[in-house]
Amino acid sequence: MSPIMFGLLSPEMLRPLEPLILRGFTSSAFDHGVPNDNHLAISNDSMLISVFNSWIEIFNVKQDSMIKKVSLGAFSSSLGISGGKFDPKVVYDPNEDRFSIIFLNSYNDSTSWIMLGFSQTNDPLGDWNVYALPGNQFKDLTWSDYPIVALSDKELFITINALWNDSSWQAGFVRSVIWQIDKFDGYNGDSLDLSYISNTKYNGQAIRNLMPVKGGSKLKGPNMFFLSNRNFDVQNDSIFILEITGVLDDAQTVLKINVETADIPYGMPPDAHQTNNYFFATNDARILGAFYEGDQIQYVQNTVDPNTGFAAVYHGIIHDISSDRSITGTIIGDPVLEFGYPNISFTGRFEGDQEALISFNHAADTVHSGFSIIYYKNDSSYTNITTVKEGENFVNKNAGSKRLSRWGDYTGSQRKYNEPGKVWISGSYGLKIKQGLFYVRLNFTWIAEILSVDSIRIPPKPPVIDSVFSSNTYPNPVANLIYVDFIMPEAAFIDVTVYDLNGRKIRTLISDNAKQGKNQLSFSTSPLMKGLYFVVIRDEDRLIKTHKFTKF
């Protein structure tokens, strides 16, 4: 499936190899609530925690088995706090080999709590240190909604939206709050050293949906970045960049707030089409995932696709985050499918890599609700969209007279820290199940292990092909047969491939060791349609030369 993109992708750019779906499995729980709220974390020892709506499931993926399932209420029962539990998030700390789980309690100021658990060891089946933070620390009839979490090398950060009682999440927003917590206190079971920041305004206006930026290849610190945008605007290019400059106990730590503009605007997405004339709510264009690697931050969000008017994914890159910042964006859309609730993780393996796996839910009026991925490579190229899980039915849970079901609010994505190139993801797909005498159509959780093929290449080495290398493609224009000549300074691996204008591979002429000296290849162009094509010459690690030719 070829995506339609705006911004970064040009016809001369080549699509990298598509990632491999190594395995996938579904959750065992029956009722996943509305919406799913999928999230996950996986340890270096392959213990995976999947959370969704009001449940926690623990898997040993080495043994392909689920070993425990517990409700959020049961997990936090030692606190003795009653009320509905919702919006779970889970993170893994590769430095300390521990897990943390965060979720919320109740929709009212008097009973609002932020529930927080730290595993005492690397075994999630063992004991946890469980805490409750006040969801209404301001005593002003607000409660905490929509938590987002990330780790630095020393601390855990939680952001929430404070909402008025008895008001919608859209109209009742008051402020965003950032909780900054010493994670070692949590692992040790000590009283938490923490603080919170609530003055998260720009030009007097509160910024909402603050996305803490996780580390790419490893945890970052001591500073932490947060991103947000104008999530309800029909079109906007503003990206808010917030930075906490140090740790809790540093008197010099401050919160910096800046705004930058992206080269490609985003916009609030429409409701997404489902089969059987049902729809999915996409909420808004908030930022839903981000990571920090090198001097770049990559992020993803919902958006509208201006070419089709469909719900789509926006992939943004903040370049030179430490100095003269700039933002480039790409809208990932499709003429049939609509996309929502993306997440992103770093997949690179070598110094200087900026590769990423983007995962998201998909739906269409002709395609059941499912889960997909796309891979981004250093050279600003993208793979085709790959379906991870095909939906089996539409979703009508609590759809009401408008036939509109919840789709988000988020999906899960985490790099497997000790296996570079691997990412574990969780999203949703439509499933029809009989409940009593009737059938219900729900969003069910799908969990998958993905491998970036590009990340398993050999480490870079000094190229043997230097300025002595020369090549030529002729005749041009061509009718029936084209020749590719190149001179190798010494015998080495070479890849010569023909692509069309859309970046689709037509034929690989050689992908093997070539001899020293002059080499000649030929290719019949008779089956090709008239138009522009490219001959691309690469060694193991880089693009060497591109030749254009025209078939007439």
Image (cartoon, rainbow, N blue to C red):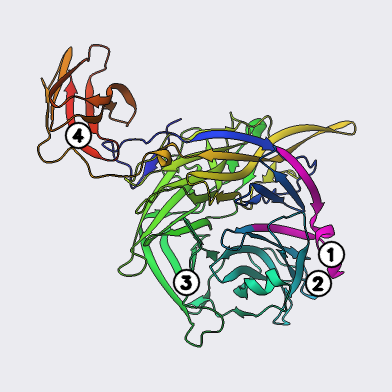
Depth check, front residue: 244 or 201: 244
Residue 426 on the magenta segment: no
* Pointer 3 local density, CA inside 10 Å: few below 14, some 14–19, many at least 20: many
Disc ID at residue 83: 1
Q: Residues within 10 Å of mark 2 (few under 14, many from 20)?
A: some
Q: Position of residue 134 (x, y in %)?
A: 74, 76
Q: Secondary structure at mark 1?
A: loop
The one nearer the camera, 313 or 389, is: 389
Q: Which mark is residue 546?
A: 4
Percent position (x, y) of residue 262? 37, 59
4 vs 3, front mark: 4
Residue density around tag 1, few if under 14, some if 14–19, many if 20 or more, within 10 Å: some
Mark 3 vs mark 1, CA separation in Å: 33 Å
Residue where numbered disc 3 is placed: 242
Query: Mark 2 near mark 1, Cβ–Cβ under 8 Å?
Result: yes
- In this view, 440 is above or below 101: above
